[in-house]
Image: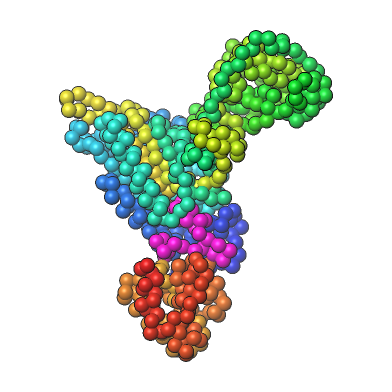
Amino acid sequence: MSELFVRTLREDPADAEVPSHRWLVRAGYIRRAAPGIYTWLPLGLRVLHKVEDIVREEMDGIGAQEVHFPALLPREPYELTDRWVEYGPNLFRLKDRKGNDMLLGPTHEEMFTLLVKDLYSSYKDLPLVLYQIQTKYRDEARPRAGLLRGREFVMKDSYSFDVDDAGLQVAYDKHREAYIRIFDRLGLDYAIVQAMSGAMGGSASEEFLAVAENGEDTFVRSPGGYAANVEAVRIGAPAPLPYDGLPAAHVEDTPRSTTIDALVQVANDLQPRADRPWHGGDTLKNVVFLLEYPDGTREPLAIGLPGDREVDEKRLEAQVEPAVAVPFGEEDFARYPSLVKGYIGPGVLGEQNASGVKYLTDPRVVPGTRWITGADADQQHVFDLVCGRDFTSDGVIDVAEIRAGDPAPDGSGPLQLARGIEMGHIFQLGRKYADALGLKVLDQNGKQVTVTMGSYGVGVSRAVAAVAEHTCDAKGLCWPRALAPYDVQVVATGKGAEIATYAADLAGALDAAGIAVLLDDRKASPGVKFADAELLGMPTTVVVGRGLADGVVELRDRASGTVEEVPVAEVMDRVVAVVRG
């Protein structure tokens, strides 16, 4: 350690929001170069390479072949798939000295597709799986949480190429099993959940989420085994209800009722129900957003949903992608005078109605349901407005918040909410990119067929942070042996040449036995050395100190905190046994 390029810190970095970020910086594994961009120091790089090795072994194990593309890419392939525009501000764009548009690759579907098109032309060449481990770039609007949400990151992306959907399913299943082995070897507590394909396109899609309180993704699971990213949850629409005999809609004055709570109180005071009190779920809340598309165009969208639910903006953006949903501002209301803020109702909403604003409703808003909703006039609401009789919408959108206790869509029990870090994502892309880029091969009958593809990603640098997040404690990092930069840290404490000499000899013997060992030979106090050993997080620490005079050294386990005195004559065999299990 006297020669290792590392500097541990006693204070948290100012921008650290999550434990993994705090400890990786304080322990000298990474160093911030710019927002969302980090330099890997020697200790961090050793962990990163171990993650890469695990990923490589499992990808090679399913017959995948490794390639490596440039990060600097031309514009043209991304124009052919529309992603030059669809990626919007998330794409790093630049020009070369001749004025040609270039980009830093956020993902490489186009390049893999064109490479196979360039070299292969027959069904005999397939199936094929190619992969790379490469640095990617996305211009995150709000980089945060250290390695978990950066602008530059290392990712494994692989792609399968098959002549038919049956072959794609085989490749997808192989990747799924390989990912299970990868995340098992990383020691992560993870969930496999249904997911949205988003800008990637395609059909079947699953995410591998490391369960973590600080995760950015919310997912749900049920006792019966249902699991999905909250963006992919689709609630079942109730059956339509008969509305013969329901009272006619009627407009009532509802003073000072611009919130759902205030409206419910006014309704119970002025228009009480005979069977039960009104509640928020009886109201139809109409929320207006502005959709901004990557090409700069904008359009309003109104969403009607039960008043006791909020619009989940992540669920919304997943469904309107590549557009981004932003709040409807005062200037927008000025452009649409028929929309009365706080009192918007279905009467003016819809592409064929007064406002011309597209109107989509929650799946729960089915024919026969009756509502209290805005009357399109200040301080007035309409009661007993019946869907299908008094109003319709332009379609359905499922973007209301999901709550703990909601029924699972497959009937497998009440949903539980949890947080996770996205570690892997597998897609059945189908023919989206092959169609756009003309990837065809001759089949057994000599006819040209479009190749079907799968796409499979693993966040390699993110895995370093996720494992750190999962295993760290109040003292620092605590690496599983499969990822630790060194198997053993030998700490020499106390004065005298005998201690230093024995510690160095033991470290040399362990190294000769093929065990990665870090020797703390610094001229520092025992307290500093012990604190740094806990901060750095090697699985095993051997403390050579005053006990050497009595023929013993200490063997410390970082994860459990146990301390064992081991006779000098046995220490080598004991350490080797611990390291090799």
* Quadrant of the rendered image containing residue 451: top left
For the record, the magenta segment spans 461-485
- Looking at the image, residue 81 sits to the left or right of residue 20; the answer is left
Q: How is the image coloured?
A: rainbow
Residue at image point 65% right, 26% down: 306
Does the stretch in magenta take in 476? yes
Can residue 279 be seen here? The reply is yes
Q: Position of residue 96 (x, y in %)?
A: 39, 41
Residue at image point 59% right, 59% down: 13
Residue sitting nearer the eye, 516 or 204: 204
Relative to 509, is 228 above or below?
above
Residue sitting nearer the eye, 107 or 389: 389
Residue at image point 48% right, 70% down: 557
Residue sitting nearer the eye, 204 or 237: 237
* Quadrant of the rendered image containing residue 579: bottom left
Relative to 523, is 533 above or below?
above
Does the stretch in magenta take in 435? no
Q: Position of residue 51 (x, y in %)?
A: 39, 56
Residue at image point 25% right, 26% down: 449
Q: Where, quadrant-wise, is the C terminus in this rendering? A: bottom left
Query: How many numbered tags mark residues here?
Result: 0
Q: Position of residue 147 (x, y in %)?
A: 49, 52
Can residue 76 be seen here? The reply is no
Q: Where, quadrant-wise, is the N terminus in this rendering? A: bottom left
Residue sitting nearer the eye, 371 or 295: 371
Q: Position of residue 520 (x, y in %)?
A: 46, 76
